[in-house]
Image (cartoon, rainbow, N blue to C red):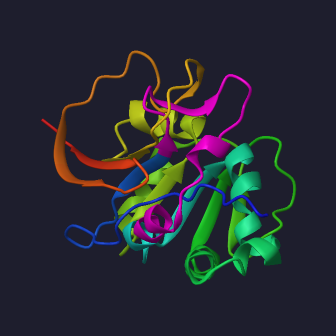
């Protein structure tokens, strides 16, 4: 049986023709994207949640990843069994393959997927250029990379799918010491116990 991998999420609508940067992840109720042993199988979405993820990120033009998240997400192009698992996984794979991918890593080798380029360090100015030159939204996934974008004030929206589990420790969704004023713009409860929360970042 193939375990479905977590998918980043983010709506494709833009404001004034400028792409927004959306940080979306699946997390435990206590805010971890992986537990202390590095496992995140407890966050595997069922079909209802996965279909909602697909709709949220539909039309996003660019995905930003760190190396480890890219290695995880590359399966949406390289793992034929995963892609063919259902109509929902095929839908997500088609969206993922059609988008541009930017991998921020000093150690990543040649990418194994199409429409993918590697940059060696995180440059806030270049991310801002990507946003202002884009007519669709951008997503950023992976807590380490997202922490840099959050601290640089580049993230416009946070999305989280809260799994009905507490893991106690692990990789946090948000970095310590971060303060953001947020506005709740959407929420949804799922039969599996997952809860979706979407917040816009309120800028002064």
Q: Seen from this angle, which residue lies furthest right?
A: 109
On the image, the x and y values in percent for residue 110 come to 86, 61
Q: Residue at x 47, y 24 (%)?
A: 175
| 78 lies left or right of 83 | right
Give residue 50's position: percent from left, percent from top.
50, 65
Question: Image quadrant of residue 80?
Answer: bottom right
Q: Residue furthest toward the left?
A: 204
Please say whether residue 156 is visible from this viewpoint.
no
Q: Residue at x 47, y 52 (%)?
A: 127
Quarter residue 90 falls in: bottom right
Residue 46 magenta: yes
Quarter of the figure with the C terminus = top left
Residue 177, placed above or below residue 165: above
Residue 28 belongs to the span the image colors magenta: yes
Asked whether residue 179 is in view, the answer is yes
Q: Residue at x 74, y 26 (%)?
A: 37
Left or right of 25, for residue 197:
left
The answer to whether 192 is drawn above or below residue 34 in the figure is below
Residue 104: image x %, image y %?
66, 48
Q: Nearer the viewer, residue 2 or 23?
A: 2
| Image location of residue 194, percent across then percent down | 40, 48
Residue 19's place in the image compared with 147, above or below, is below
- What range is drawn magenta here? 26-53
């Amino acid at each position: 049986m193939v375990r479905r991998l977590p998918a980043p999420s983010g709506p494709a609508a833009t404001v004034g023709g400028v792409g927004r940067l959306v940080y979306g992840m699946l997390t435990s109720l206590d805010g971890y994207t992986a537990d202390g042993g590095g496992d995140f199988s407890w966050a595997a979405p069922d079909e209802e949640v996965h279909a909602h993820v697909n709709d949220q990120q539909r039309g996003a033009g660019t995905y930003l990843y760190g190396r480890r998240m890219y290695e995880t997400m590359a399966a949406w192009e390289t793992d034929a069994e995963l892609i063919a698992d259902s109509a929902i996984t095929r839908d997500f794979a088609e969206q993922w393959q059609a988008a541009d991918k930017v991998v921020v890593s000093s150690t990543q080798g040649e990418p194994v997927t199409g429409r993918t380029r590697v940059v060696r360090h995180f440059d806030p100015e270049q991310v801002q250029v990507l946003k202002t030159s884009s007519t669709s939204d951008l997503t950023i996934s992976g807590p380490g990379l997202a922490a840099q974008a959050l601290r640089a004030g580049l993230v416009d929206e946070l999305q989280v799918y809260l799994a009905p589990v507490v893991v106690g420790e692990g990789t946090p969704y948000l970095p310590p010491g971060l303060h953001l004023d947020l506005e709740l713009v959407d929420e949804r409860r799922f039969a599996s116990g997952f809860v979706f929360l979407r917040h816009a970042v309120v800028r002064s």
